Image (cartoon, rainbow, N blue to C red):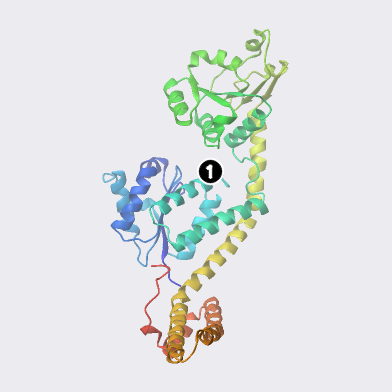
Amino acid sequence: MHNNFKLVSLTYKNSPIEIRERVALDDQQSTDLLRKLKSILNIPEAFVLSTCNRTEVYYTSENDLSGEIIKLIIVEKGLLDVTDLEQYFVKYNDEKEAMRHLFHVAIGLESQLIGDMQISNQVKRAYQTCADENMAGPFLHRLLHTIFFTNKRIVQETPFRDGAASVSYAASELVYDLAAEIINPRVLVIGLGEIGTDVCKNIGDSDNVDKLFKVTVINRTNEKATKLAAQYGFASRLYDEVYDAILESDIIISAVSLQKPLITKSLFEQREHLSYKYLIDLSVPRSIEAEVENIPGALVYNIDDIRNKADEAMRKRINAIPDVKAIIEEALTEVDGWLQEMEVSPTIHRLKNALEQIRQEEIARYLKNLDDKEADYIEKITKGMMQKIIKLPVLQLKAACKRGEAETLIDVLNNLFDLEKQSNPKEIRK
């Protein structure tokens, strides 16, 4: 089997965030890089995956082109001034290891948050880009679709994707659960530090969020709130309006860092008529006063409630890892078998062509003496004979592939039928 599939990888495991941020490729840069891989390096199939945690280029080539690919990334990002950037990249030149790594990435085994649900969609978008640029041939199409099918198996057969395994995911899941109980729910997120921003991203990246509820964000630095709101189609308000916004909202997520609670019992006692409110406190120290729970119609979830839910989900995911890896290995074996069969596919085509040529030449000698009905009989009989003759060699070739002995049988068939004279069929992989 050819060792053509390779990988150049820079991830959170081997590079600091300052490097990852500078190397990360946006959609247009990923597209431009794909085009250069094709036009400059003559790479027939390539797949570029770039997220906040990784920038990776998967490609097919008989040669190690990792150095050239890294240089293209450096030029694309304008990083000529950064020294020793290549040290952060890991190179996978073993085909099986490169495929296994892509499986692990797409499933979420390589994510900072094990089982990350966003990575699957990111891989699908990257695949769509490489397909749009005609950089996905039979090999990448087969590999990626096998990965997507494997992901479905893992969801159906293991608890690896059950529940939300981070505080921000768990909080956003809770928001969806609560919003389902309210007509036209109004959601307010206060504080856009790391966790508050993650909650907004999780909500914003969900499908049809605008159809489910209205989201408003507030931050002490209004510029950050305005920018994030514009990115996801949310509304934003000034921090001075935070108390009015709280009273007008149905679900409030508080993720601010303060020494005293921002939301107190007295705030709600000022209102004669108070709508039912769900409050989610993601702050440490708490930003929602404990006494708020005594207000009729107010229900408070604190960070311990959320964290316990996330921890339980994470334990399930970790326990499921052996089963997940077993399913991945089954899929890799399937792809490996397909690749091995592709190695003998040209020989099979040549053998079929050689036998068909013999059949056509022999039939041509006698057809002039036959009527149409007799010619039709001869056509059917000889085709059936040819299919039976070729069946055993094909089965033997495929069996030899599995044993790693295909090369010897290919040589025998080449000699017996002089297959080198046959025009080469279009190669599956280059």
Please indicate, yes or no, whether residue 249 appears anywhere in the rendered image: yes
Q: Quadrant of residue 164?
A: top right
Q: Position of residue 279 (x, y in %)?
A: 64, 23
Horizontal placement of 108 versus 418: left or right? right
For image coordinates 59% across by 16% down, the residue present is 248
What is the three-letter code of the residue carrying label 1?
Gln
For image coordinates 49% across by 16% down, the residue present is 239
The answer to whether 93 is drawn above or below residue 381 in the figure is above
Q: Nearer the viewer, residue 180 or 10?
A: 180
Q: Which residue is mark 1?
A: 118
For image coordinates 67% across by 9% down, the residue present is 269
| Helix, strand or loop at mark 1 | helix
Q: Which quadrant is the C terminus positioned in?
A: bottom left
Q: Nearer the viewer, residue 250 or 219?
A: 250
Horizontal placement of 405 versus 269: left or right? left
Q: Position of residue 47 (x, y in %)?
A: 42, 54
Q: Position of residue 322 (x, y in %)?
A: 63, 57
